[in-house]
């Protein structure tokens, strides 16, 4: 979709909503995906390594720590959106092998038609439920990064927002693998608290990263949870806090206990 072109739309049969992709008038090469009138994703075709949305930048920073800088990784995206993070991984880690699971076939086709992936991207797409599709990639393939970006407040699917699902996802991780979960929640952080507890039962260690004010529980927003196969490295806390977006805070260990309840 070249800059200046009229917005494109596609009807999504699964949800009955319309998806729209339109140029971002404030960013050269930028495009916005909206579903049902609500902005969902932002893509910068001119610079896929530049992530506009704050919570996606935080996820990208966790991915940065999962392996030495520039080294290819294997990545599984549960919830594709506009494939912003798949583009980021290709830009920062060329040669990475990636899989993306999306419930809406029309959405994935629409995004790939309107916003082509960077040249050389090795992305395998799967259509279906995130939990059911976990078994589809080759059995011997283990992922360095699994990213779950589906949850939004109290409407989170129960079969995904549970320890059993996290255990199944963890079984697909490599030894250095990180399970990253974006949790969009309302004031009180009921969903965040339940997911911290569930993820802790499935992973060796867990940390939470967000804009510092989110941890007061007074505001709606996003908190990023990261589960690791090893004890959470203190240097990761320092790195994520320094990289922002600011003000940033990372909770791990005893600091996370209160949030977990």
Image: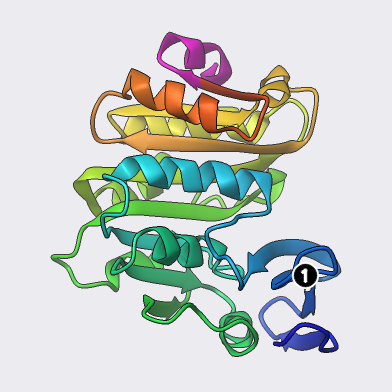
Name the chief secondary structure element in magenta: helix
> Does the segment drawn in magenta span residue 225?
no
Which residue is identified by label 1?
34
Q: Is residue 181 visible?
A: no
**Is 78 drawn above or below residue 125 in the view shown?**
above
| Residue occupying image coordinates x 47% and y 75% | 128
Specify the quadrant that holds the N terminus.
bottom right
Position above or below: 184 against 203? below
Query: Count of labels shown?
Result: 1
Image quarter where the C terminus lies is: top right
Give the SS element for disc 1. strand
Can residue 179 be seen here? yes
Q: Vertical placement of 149 versus 83: above or below?
A: above
Rendered image quadrant of residue 37 = bottom right
Picture quarter containing residue 249? top right
- State the extent of the magenta-drawn residues as a range: 251-261
Quadrant of the rendered structure where residue 254 is? Answer: top left
| For residue 123, side relative to residue 105 (left or right) | left
Please provide percent x and percent y for residue 133: 37, 70
257 inside magenta stretch? yes
Residue sitting nearer the eye, 80 or 57: 57
Tell me which residue sits at (37%, 62%) in the image.
Answer: 76
């Amino acid at each position: 979709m070249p800059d200046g072109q009229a917005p494109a739309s596609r009807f999504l049969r699964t949800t009955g909503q319309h998806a729209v992709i339109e140029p971002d008038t404030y960013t050269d090469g930028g495009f916005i995906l909206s579903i049902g009138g609500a902005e969902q994703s932002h893509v910068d075709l001119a610079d896929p390594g530049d992530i506009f949305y704050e919570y996606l930048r935080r996820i990208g920073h966790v991915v940065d720590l999962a392996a030495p800088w520039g080294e290819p990784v294997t990545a599984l995206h549960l919830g594709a959106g506009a494939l912003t993070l798949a583009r980021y991984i290709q830009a920062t880690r060329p040669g990475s092998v990636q899989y993306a699971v999306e419930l809406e076939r029309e959405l994935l086709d629409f995004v790939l038609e309107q916003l082509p992936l960077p040249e050389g991207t090795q992305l395998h797409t799967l259509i279906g439920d995130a939990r059911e599709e976990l078994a589809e990639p080759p059995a011997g393939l283990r992922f360095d990064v699994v990213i779950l970006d589906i949850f939004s407040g109290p409407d989170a699917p129960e079969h995904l927002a549970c320890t059993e699902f996290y255990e199944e996802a963890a079984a697909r991780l490599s030894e250095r693998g990180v399970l990253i979960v974006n949790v969009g929640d309302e004031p009180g952080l009921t969903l965040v608290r339940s997911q911290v507890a569930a993820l802790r039962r499935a992973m060796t260690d867990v940390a939470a990263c967000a804009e510092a004010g989110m941890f007061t529980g007074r505001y709606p927003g996003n908190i990023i949870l990261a589960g690791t196969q090893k004890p959470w490295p203190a240097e990761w806390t320092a790195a994520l806090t320094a990289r922002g977006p600011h003000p940033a805070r990372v909770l791990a260990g005893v600091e996370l206990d209160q949030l977990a309840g």
